Each structure stands twice: as structure tokens, then as C-alpha cells.
């Protein structure tokens, strides 16, 4: 019952509710102890087009495989969650801005080069990623808003 309440049924990742609870704890820890945590938002490009072209099973296939890619490319101290239909969030601890940028570029490269074949058709994945670091007076809402704005700016810039 707890698994269902805290995890996404499709991907098995933590869900939005569980993620926000975890984020609240991390923000408090960062502010109390001066730890460094980055919040990343990742939005899949053109999931609707994939669903419309190949069917929802193909979209689900893509999301499951993307979840696996993300899980396989973060450390055990980090967290990845599915927080919406085509949106994922990651918490990365104790990385500076340069390390986060490298992690983002590596993730995007891994996502774009994933060899996903659904019923004989290659499915190409694109994604936009934005991030924000926990600040000394941040609320969870402010942190999420900055990461969301950065993700949409990344999407707009085509990065």
C-alpha cells in the first residue's frame, strides 16, 4: 500500500507527493547544515506526438526506458522521480554548478543516443532540463519555480 502511495505505477519511481516530501527535508537539511543540493526538472520533448503517432503504449515504453536511463545515471545519494505525465525531477547532492552542467549534458547525450526500438520503429527522445540550487532562505515552492523556469528557458532555447 505504501509503495502505491509513494511511487509512480508506470515507472516505479517516487511520485510527485513523495518527491516533494523528500525535497522539503533536503531543503531544511541544506539550510541547517549548509549542504549543497541541486533540483533538476526534465521535460520530455514531443511525448504527445509519439503517443499520437505510435500509440500510448509507445509513450509508456519511452517513459519506462527514460526512467531507467535516469536511475542508471545518478548516484545512490541522489533521487529521481516522475512528477507528471512527461516530467521528471532529480535531486543531486553535493555538486557544484560545473558538475551539474556536466551531469545535465551527459544525461541529455545518453537520452538522445538511447537506442529505443518499439515494434520495429526507432523512437528518438529529446528533453529539456533546467535546474536550481537550494538557497539559504528558499522555500520548496521558490526552488521548484526557479527550476521550472530554467527548464522552460532551456526548451525555448532548444538546448
Image (cartoon, grey):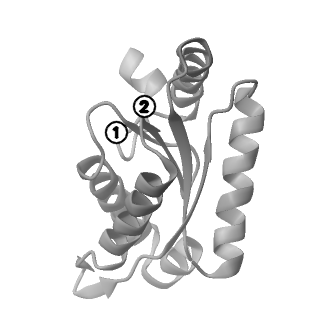
The quarter of the rendered structure image containing the C terminus is bottom right
Determine whether label 2 and label 1 are within 8 Å by CB.
yes
Work out whether 132 lies above or below 157. above
User: Which label number is shown at residue 12?
Assistant: 1
Q: Residue at x 54, y 79 (%)?
A: 52
State left or right for residue 93 relative to residue 155. Answer: left
For the residue labelled by badge 1, is the local secondary structure a helix, a strand or a loop?
A: loop
User: Quick check: can you spot residue 35?
Assistant: yes
Q: Residue at x 27, y 74 (%)?
A: 114
N-terminal-most mark, 2 or 1: 2
Q: Which picture quadrant has residue 63?
A: bottom left
Observer-nearest residue: 31 or 145? Answer: 31
User: Quick check: can you spot residue 1?
Assistant: no
Q: Residue at x 46, y 24 (%)?
A: 6
Furthest residue toward top: 32
Q: Residue at x 55, y 74 (%)?
A: 45
State left or right for residue 47 relative to residue 70. Answer: right
Name the spot of residue 150 as percent of width and height, x first. 69, 59
Name the spot of residue 146 as percent of width and height, x first. 73, 48
For the residue labelled by badge 2, is the local secondary structure a helix, a strand or a loop?
A: loop
The quarter of the rendered structure image containing the N terminus is top left
**How crowded is the residue under tag 1: few (<14 C-alpha within 10 Å), some, or many (20+)?**
some
Work out whether 78 lies above or below 136. below
Work out whether 37 lies above or below 67. above
User: Which label number is shown at residue 7?
Assistant: 2
Work out whether 85 lies above or below 118. above
Amino acid at each position: 500500500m505504501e509503495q502505491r502511495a509513494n511511487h509512480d505505477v508506470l515507472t516505479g519511481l517516487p511520485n510527485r507527493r513523495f518527491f516533494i516530501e523528500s525535497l522539503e527535508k533536503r531543503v531544511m537539511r541544506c539550510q541547517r547544515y549548509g549542504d549543497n543540493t541541486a533540483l533538476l526538472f526534465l521535460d520530455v520533448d514531443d511525448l504527445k506526438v509519439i503517443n499520437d503517432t505510435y500509440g500510448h503504449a509507445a509513450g509508456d515504453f519511452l517513459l519506462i526506458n527514460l526512467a531507467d536511463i535516469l536511475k542508471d545515471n545518478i548516484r545512490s545519494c541522489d533521487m529521481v522521480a516522475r512528477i507528471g505525465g512527461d516530467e521528471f525531477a532529480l535531486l543531486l547532492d553535493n555538486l557544484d554548478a560545473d558538475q551539474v552542467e556536466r551531469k545535465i549534458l551527459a544525461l541529455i547525450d545518453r537520452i538522445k543516443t538511447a537506442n529505443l526500438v518499439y515494434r520495429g520503429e526507432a523512437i528518438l527522445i529529446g528533453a529539456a532540463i533546467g535546474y536550481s540550487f537550494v538557497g539559504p532562505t528558499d522555500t520548496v515552492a521558490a526552488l521548484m519555480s526557479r527550476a521550472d523556469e530554467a527548464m522552460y528557458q532551456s526548451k525555448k532555447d532548444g538546448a
